[in-house]
Image (cartoon, rainbow, N blue to C red):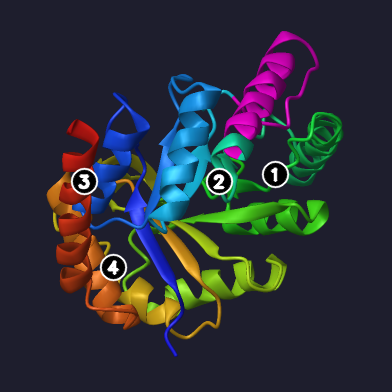
Amino acid sequence: MAPSLHYGPARVPSRESPDEAIALLQERGFTACEIDFEGKFWMDYPWAERFGELARDADIVLSVHAPIAGFMGHAERGKKLNMAVGMLDHSAGIAKAAGAELVVFHPGFLLGREREDAIASVVEQLGELRERLERKGRAVPFGVEIMGRVRELGTADDVFAISARTGWVRPVLDFAHLHAVTDGGFTEASAFSTVLAGADQVLPPGVPFHVHFSDIAFANRNETKHLPYGEGTLRAAPLGEALATFDRPATVITESPDLVSDEAIREELYAAVGTRAASRASSSAASSGRERARRNSA
């Protein structure tokens, strides 16, 4: 049996209302969405609660991407660390209100330290954050993202180590970043399978893989920008083939710069996984989304 697969964008498609956002997600055939706080917080708690309620009814799984500055592993304690903790705390509060699967965050930087020292610092500060979240009833799962700069913190091994040492932090598998740092090395299903196997070892049973995906431009083994699908060399079919070999669900978040790319990746991914006929699902969801929109405007 093919694994369960949810797929959707890295941005909420409307900030006008939760109802409009869900209607658009359904109309476009998406079954996942990442709440986009990378730049700033824009959603309040009532918005999040309503968004989460509607998402559950529509079988759309949610995640939250914390602000970029919300990373752990600061070399010095002080204002920047306190600000990061506050950002991650608030992200967790929104995630709980919305019923999101996890909060995605970046692992930070080496800051002149040995890799092991930087990882130890991340784990230590995450432990302190966890205690704060537990006291406030916000101890939701977090996800640490594989990064796209070859000489910085955030390799697949770094992310797996952080996840294994914490137990409540999951790996977020950004295959665009991995494609960049390997100079275009993710062209075969075997490359995807190797990374998925590493994540499978540290994830609890039944917890979905959390994947970021888009076509990508890179130089000197560092990411430069996300590309419309087809303009680079990263393809969704090998990812789908690899996912189909694991008995674990997956949530795939598209970070492509346009809707046409999002749809093209979805069709190729679902075809390779064999989960469902994406075009038929999209058509059904579009009909449902239009009906919801009509009800909301009535």
Mark 2 element type: loop
Mark 4 element type: helix
Which residue does the numbered mark 2 point to in the structure image? Answer: 100
> Is residue 88 rendered magenta in the image?
yes
* Mark with earlier residue (3, 4): 3
Distance in Å between CA atoms under marks 3 and 4:
14 Å
* Mark with earlier residue (2, 1): 2
Q: Nearer the viewer, mark 3 or mark 1?
A: 1
* 142 relative to 269 in the view: left or right: right
**Residue at left 46%, top 19%?**
40
Choose between 150 and 98: the one closer to the eye: 98
* Mark with earlier residue (2, 4): 2
**Where's residue 87, x and y in %?**
62, 22
Mark 3 element type: strand
Task: Please report contact status of discs 4 and 1: CB closer than 8 Å, yes or no.
Answer: no
Which residue does the numbered mark 1 point to in the structure image? Answer: 140
Q: Amino acid at mark 3?
A: Leu
For the N terminus, the image quarter is bottom left
Give the extent of the magenta segment.
70-95
Residue 227 marker: 3
Which residue does the numbered mark 4 point to in the structure image? Answer: 236
- Quarter of image, res 204: bottom right
For the C terminus, the image quarter is top left
* Mark with earlier residue (4, 1): 1
Distance in Å between CA atoms under marks 2 and 3:
27 Å
